[in-house]
Image (cartoon, coloured by chain):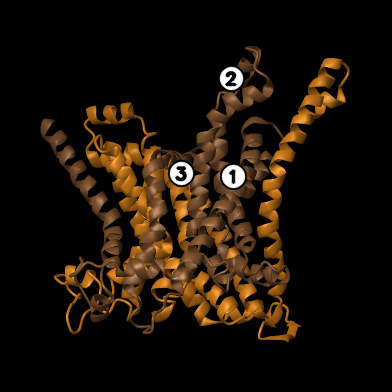
Amino acid sequence: MTTTVATAATPRKRQSSDRVAAENRLGLKLVAPAVIVMLVVTAWPMVQALYLSLYRYRLTTPDDRSFVGLRNYGTILTDSLFWRDTLNTVIIMLVSVAVELVIGFAFAMVMHRVIFARGIIRTSILIPYGIITVVSAFAWQFAFSVNNGFVNSWFAWLPGIQTGADATNWFGHHWPAMFAIIVSEVWKTTPFMSLLLLAGLSQVSEDMLEAAQVDGATWWQRLRKVILPNMRAAIMVAVLFRALDAFRIFDNIYVMTRGAQNTESSSFLTYRQVIEQFQLGLGSALSVLLFLTVLLLAFGIVKLFRVDLARARGEA
Amino acid sequence: MARSTRRTLLGTWAGFVVILVWCLLPVAWILSLSFKSPEETGAGSPHFLPQTWTLQNYRDILSNDDFLYALRNSFAIAIIATVLSVIFATLAAYAIARLEFRGKRLVLSLALAIAMFPVVSLISPLFDMWRHFHLFNTWPGLIIPYMTFTLPLAIWTLSAFFREIPWEMEQAAQVDGATPWQAFRKVIVPLAAPGVFTAAILTFFFAWNEFALAISLTSTTSARTVPAQMSFFVGSDPFNPPYGQLATASVIVTVPIVIIVLLFQRKIVAGLTSGAVKG
């Protein structure tokens, strides 16, 4: 482009560079509204949060606002509650993404094979995807409820689950409550995972699979050596999106436990400091930390999968 | 060989049933709860189906003004946010799919970054800013962030769709004597409409579902949406929530989702996967 401008001797060339410039201008004009909206509603508040995080600022005592530098960050990073909540969030993220990846892959395999009633299966898988997270949380909270749920009575034959007078109180202890939260998260988001994996699966060439079968590869070998390597891009996209989404978990916890039994997540802690405690300064510092964590996580996952990809190529 | 195909078929059938049960059981559970009487849930009922079926919960919830206001807010906010988001995204996606301009990659990266943005970290600054701008507890106070957070998904879905459109057809129509406006309206609009529609559905789902901002940036029923309102449905006894009422409210907010899914399932799947796999 620049070389054309530099040697703009012939009229034809000048005309084409004019067209390039006009196209450039039109392109910028068309993306401008979306870009401006995205920047104004996210970048500007984040700068505002960064600024507020340097103050001691509580809405109940607004006159007491004073500059404290990085002290809010110090308070948070030395508080065991912050680390406990971060650990909870990481556990929820790792477990739900791992479980979803397995269930979602199984679902994708079934949907890929099914030749009958495709509409029915598509509809039923899209209902959890479309359903409101709050509704999913209520449905599972009631399912696990001590006196009104069906989980206790249906699964009483499993060790550790009881009905009747000393029925299992799922929301009375840390791990059972975490389990219930993870179940509702997994139920709601597995469809998204399985649809992305299905798209990846349908791009694996049938010829290659048949060739592997003719060569005597077992089902497991075909899965490991042909299907999974060819789906790596789809798996990466699905894991990246779901992991970041699971890390932001908030709705389920709010509805199911409100953070009781040490089930609070990073998002819930941030919400609680701002909206319930009116700690705008401390809450803003938590917001900034949450943002940085998600950024780091995204970067980490992308890096991790690239490493994996390179290693897989080396193997092959 | 024949035996293994029969086994695969059997496995597929079993998988089919498992998927159906897994996806629909909680929905059936909520539906069943919505027909249980307050007496039954109050006394504790471990049965899956109601002992006696009643419509009392539906009568109660449909005469509950707070719920009806919330329903109105939800519809209005989700629809307005969807329309605005799709308009902005269509302009941007057209440019990304058809034009060469500097900063294209930057726009796509920005969209990607915002798709990953933790919404909760905006609660604190927006709570502060919205009070100054008098946007706290108003429709625009929710429409603006919803529109923003759905833009990335809409831009991706639409640019993936627009890349597939045979744009030469517009010129072909003009050669055949159509005016530019006719060529656009009769050729391009029908080709682009399914993509725009798909983006609109996905955007609507997001806005209909959003909860964290809805409870943080509203304080009364003048702007509170259904998910937020539902979390405030606490009966007299905090240890025994009004199961039937909550289940009924859940059923009612799920009805629009089920209708959209039944009508447009193909489009939704295409939209979800095109944006993610090709983008």
Residue B210 image offset from top left, x and y in percent: 51, 61
The chain drawn brown is chain what? B
User: Residue A49, labelled with which disc?
Assistant: none
Residue B241 image offset from top left, x and y in percent: 35, 78
Residue A265 image offset from top left, x and y in percent: 47, 72
Please determine whether, in this image, residue A242 is positioned above or below residue B7.
Answer: below
SS label for mark 3: helix
Please determine whether, in this image, residue B91 is positioned above or below residue A127.
Answer: above
Dot 2: chain letter: B
Location of the C terminus of chain A by quadrant is top left
Residue nearest the viewer, comparing A77 with A202? A202
Please determine whether, in this image, residue B180 is positioned above or below residue A232.
Answer: above
User: Residue B272, labelled with which disc?
Assistant: 3
Disc 1 and disc 2 in contact, CB within 8 angstroms:
no
> How far apart, in angstroms, are the residues tagged by discs 3 and 2?
27 Å
Location of the N terminus of chain A by quadrant is top right
Mark before the other along the chain sequence, 1 or 3: 1
User: Residue B169, labelled with which disc?
Assistant: 2
Q: What amino acid is at disc 3? A: Leu
The chain drawn orange is chain what? A
Residue A193 visible at all: no
Dot 3: chain letter: B
